[in-house]
Image (cartoon, grey):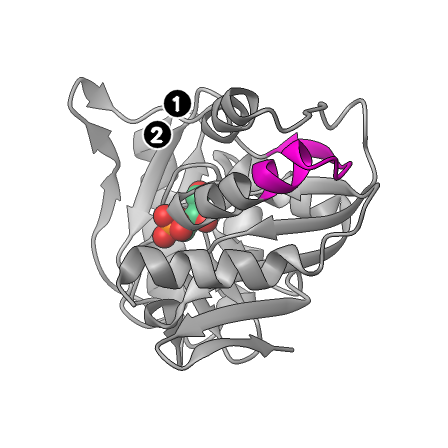
Amino acid sequence: MDARQLKIAAAQAALEHVEDGMRLGIGTGSTADEFVRLLAEKVADGFKIQGVPTSERTARLCMELGVPLYSLDDLPELDLTIDGADEVDGALRLIKGGGGALLREKIVASASSRMIVIADESKLVDMLGRFPLPIEVAQFGVAATRIAVERLASRLGLSGEIALRLEKDGAYLTDGNHFILDASFGRIPDAEALANGLAAIAGVVEHGLFLNMANAAIIASQNGARTLL
Ligand code: 5RP
C-alpha cells in the first residue's frame, strides 16, 4: 500500500464507527479528506449524517461531494469526531495543526462525545515533539507572544526554533485570521506542563497539543488497520 492507500485504509476503518443519524465532527487534512470521500459515497447511498466541518477546506470538500453540513452553533453537541493527526503517542496524546485547523479542530472535538483519530503508522511516536508543535497566536503582539513561548520553553528545558508559519504571500493565516508559530522542540517529555503553560500565555489562542481528547486511534500499516485504545 502506498501512502494514500494507508490513509484510505484508516478512513475506511473509521467509517465503521459512524452510525446512521449521527452528528459528526469532520476533521481536516489529507487523511480526513479520504474519510470525507468515503463518507460521501455512503451519503449518496442514503446514509444520513449531520456533519460539522473543522475548517473551510473541509467544508468546501463536503459541499462538493454532497455531505450535509451544519455549523457548530446549529449542532453544539456532537456524537463523534473523526480527524487526522500529525503525531499520536501510545497514550493517545496528539500533535495537531499541521494543516492549520487546530483551533476549530479542538473546539469541535471538545463538543463531541468521542474522538477517533485516523493516521498511518508514520504518525505513531514514542514521545511527542518530532513534528513542530503548531501554536495559533493573535496577530497583535506576535513578537511578544513568541518571546513568552520561548521563555516558557526554556523554563521547561525545551529548546528549538519557534518560527512564524509562512506561505507564498507572507504569513500563513488560519480560518480565524490568526498566525501560527511552529515550535520545533524535538521531544516534549512533559506535554501536560507545556499545554498548561501555553494556555496561560495571553497571545496564545490555542495550541496543537490534544491531551485527553482522543478515545481511539486507528493506525494503518502494511498489515492493515489496528485500533489503539
Ligand atoms: C490539520 C491537522 C491534520 O489532522 C494533521 O495535519 C494531519 O494531516 P494529514 O492527514 O494531511 O497528515 O491537524 O490542522
Question: In the rendered structure, which amino acid carries the disc numbered 2?
Answer: Val
Range of residues picked out in magenta: 39-53
Asked whether the residues under the numbered discs 1 and 2 touch, taking CB atoms below 8 Å apart as contact, a structural biologist would say: yes
Quadrant the N terminus occupies: bottom left
- At x 78%, y 36%, the residue is 48
Disc 2 element: helix
Residue 95 versus residue 75 in the image, above or below: below
- At x 41%, y 21%, the residue is 140
Q: Is any part of residue 6 visible from this angle?
A: yes
Residue at disc 1, CB closer than 8 Å to ligand 1: no
Disc 1 element: loop
Residue 139 tag number: 1
Mark 2 nearby-residue class (10 Å; few <14, some 14–19, many ≥20) = some
Question: In the rendered structure, which amino acid carries the disc numbered 1?
Answer: Gln
- At x 81%, y 33%, the residue is 76
Residue 142 tag number: 2
